[in-house]
Amino acid sequence: MKKALRFIIVTGIIIIISSYITVSSFVAMQVTNSVRLEITSFPEEYDLPYENVEFFARGTNIKLKGWYVPSLLPTERTIIITHGLNGNRSGNLELAKGLRNLNYNVLLYDIRGHGESEGERFNGGFIERFDLLGAFDYIENLPTDPSKIGILGFSLGAGISLMAAEEENKIAAVVTDSAFADIADLVVQETERRTSLPKWIVPSIIPGMTTATKLFYGIDVDDISPIKAIAKLDFPILLIHPIDDDRIPHSHSVRLMNQSINPNSELWSVPDVPHAAIYTNKPKIYLQKLNLYFNSQLK
């Protein structure tokens, strides 16, 4: 009788552990899968001259696609724009036109697993920083003075921008829009958003899921931390964030601002605007803010 009971208990424990591992692994696969949306608009629709470009993420053979939009008048000043999760380069064409009219060259590109770029897995921004660095290398090799290259990122792209700047000391101008401070703070929220699991079960799955992402995909949640990166950047940073952001709370940019070591960094907070939509709602002042910042940094 005791042996039978022991067998039932051991079998039950094995089933529970196996189920937990299976579910955690499946969730890790779902959460890290990128959603590739089709490019639906093109530069010619905005009367923009452009060149189709492609380059490799730094240190990899992952090919990325983009559009290079030249300035109105010859200049080395170039802004690289990095889109957010599940976006692509076509979402920032109107902004690219505004920057071109201010006499900047603009590079729009798709991060890995998005748009027309290679790759299929979302890495939280830590690995994608090499995509942005590949874009930086492409512009630098045109050739262009690297001190004339500015970085602008939205949401996930904002976090990528800060982590890339930590990696590349030639970068000295970064604007973040709706940035996250630390991905660990968003893991529960994004798991709920990207899976069909009941909300009550998600917190218990997180430890197994984060372990599975590290084991199977090499993604360590602890590494994905723009707030650690910004604390090492000695140049002024312009942070932009909607106060009422329902995707990445405004408090993330407040924390980032508090960790910036340059006293000339600025946080521009805007009320009554959705996540990463300040330019859409206030394009004129948005461009003024960008121009003032980039003019001061890209000398």
Image (tube, rainbow, N blue to C red):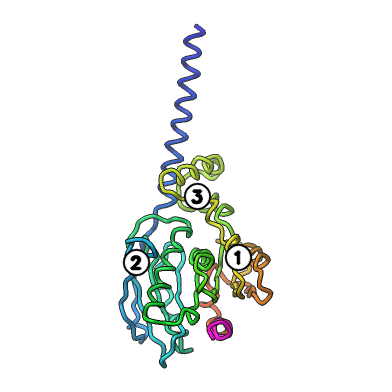
Measured in 3D between alpha carbons, the distance from the residue under mark 3 to the one under mark 1, in whole angstroms, is 20 Å
Q: Residue 121: x and y, percent?
A: 39, 55
Q: Residues within 10 Å of mark 2 (few under 14, many from 20)?
A: many
Secondary structure state at the residue bearing disc 3: loop
Determine which residue is flagged by label 2. 56
Secondary structure state at the residue bearing disc 2: strand
Q: Which SS type dominates the magenta stretch? A: helix
Magenta stretch holds residue 178? no
Magenta stretch holds residue 297? yes
Q: Residues within 10 Å of mark 3 (few under 14, many from 20)?
A: some
Where does the magenta region start and end? Answer: 290-299
Q: Residue at x 66, y 77 (%)?
A: 264
Amino acid under disc 3: Asp
Q: Residue at x 38, y 65 (%)?
A: 57
Determine which residue is flagged by label 3. 220
> Do the CB atoms of the residues marked 1 and 2 lie less than 8 Å apart?
no
> Which one is in front, 36 or 108?
108
Amino acid under disc 1: Lys
Determine which residue is flagged by label 1. 232
Quarter holding the C terminus? bottom right
Secondary structure state at the residue bearing disc 1: loop
Quarter residue 62 falls in = bottom left
Q: Which numbered disc flags the more N-terminal residue, 3 or 1?
A: 3
Q: Residue 132: x and y, percent?
A: 43, 68
Measured in 3D between alpha carbons, the distance from the residue under mark 1 to the one under mark 2, in whole angstroms, is 26 Å
Q: Nearer the viewer, mark 3 or mark 1?
A: 1
Q: Residue 195: x and y, percent?
A: 45, 48
> Do the CB atoms of the residues marked 3 and 1 lie less than 8 Å apart?
no
Of all residues shown, which one is farthest toward the bottom? 73
> Do the CB atoms of the residues marked 3 and 2 lie less than 8 Å apart?
no
Q: Give above or below for 107 relative to 245.
A: below
